[in-house]
Amino acid sequence: MSSSRILDLVKTQCRIFSLNFNPQRLRLGNKILRQRLRGPALAAWYPKKTVSFRDLQNTYKPLGLTTFDEAEDDREEAIQIAKLRGKGRPKKKRTAAESRSAKKKK
């Protein structure tokens, strides 16, 4: 049989069985694309999100009820102390375009 006849036979076979026809045998990544998706399995591994204190705060804020989060208050206080000691977060680097727009606003 001639090679063109064999190629036609393989092309028809690929069309019947829903395979990719790749006579040059290029690396197309079809092996990976045929695999099952891993997203649902990975998502099922982690526990579901529970209600946090911040969610409760956001729920009761429209009602006018105030809440006090001691852990958040301690965190903000630690940040203030670090800033006073010069250990706070550095300022954002400004680009030339930002500095020009800031000067125009003044």
Image: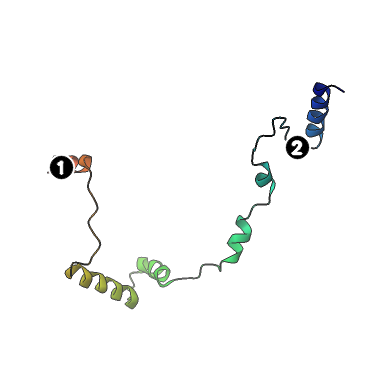
Residue closer to the observer: 13 or 58: 13
Residue 54: % across, % down:
39, 69
- The kind of secondary structure element at disc 2 is loop
The residue under the point 72% across, 30% down is 23
Total marks shown come to 2
Query: In this rendering, does residue 67 appear at all?
Result: no
Residue 78: % across, % down:
26, 73
Q: Quadrant of residue 57?
A: bottom left
Quadrant (top left/top right/bottom left/bottom right) for the C terminus:
top left
Q: Quick check: 1 left or right of 29?
A: right
Quadrant (top left/top right/bottom left/bottom right) for the N terminus:
top right
- Residue occupied by mark 2: 19
Query: In this rendering, does residue 38 appear at all?
Result: yes
Q: Quadrant of residue 3?
A: top right
- The kind of secondary structure element at disc 1 is helix
Distance in Å between CA atoms under marks 2 and 1: 62 Å
Residue 73: % across, % down:
29, 74
The residue under the point 60% across, 60% down is 42
Q: Quick check: 20 left or right of 55?
A: right
* Scheme by which the image is coloured: rainbow
The residue under the point 13% across, 42% down is 103
In the image as oriented, which residue stretches furthest toward the front?
2
Q: Quick check: 27 left or right of 63?
A: right
The residue under the point 63% across, 55% down is 38
In the image as oriented, which residue stretches furthest toward the left?
106
- Residue occupied by mark 1: 105
Residue closer to the observer: 86 or 59: 86
The kind of residue tagged 2 is Leu
Residue 45: % across, % down:
60, 65
Q: Quadrant of residue 5?
A: top right
The kind of residue tagged 1 is Lys
Q: Quick check: 46 left or right of 23?
A: left
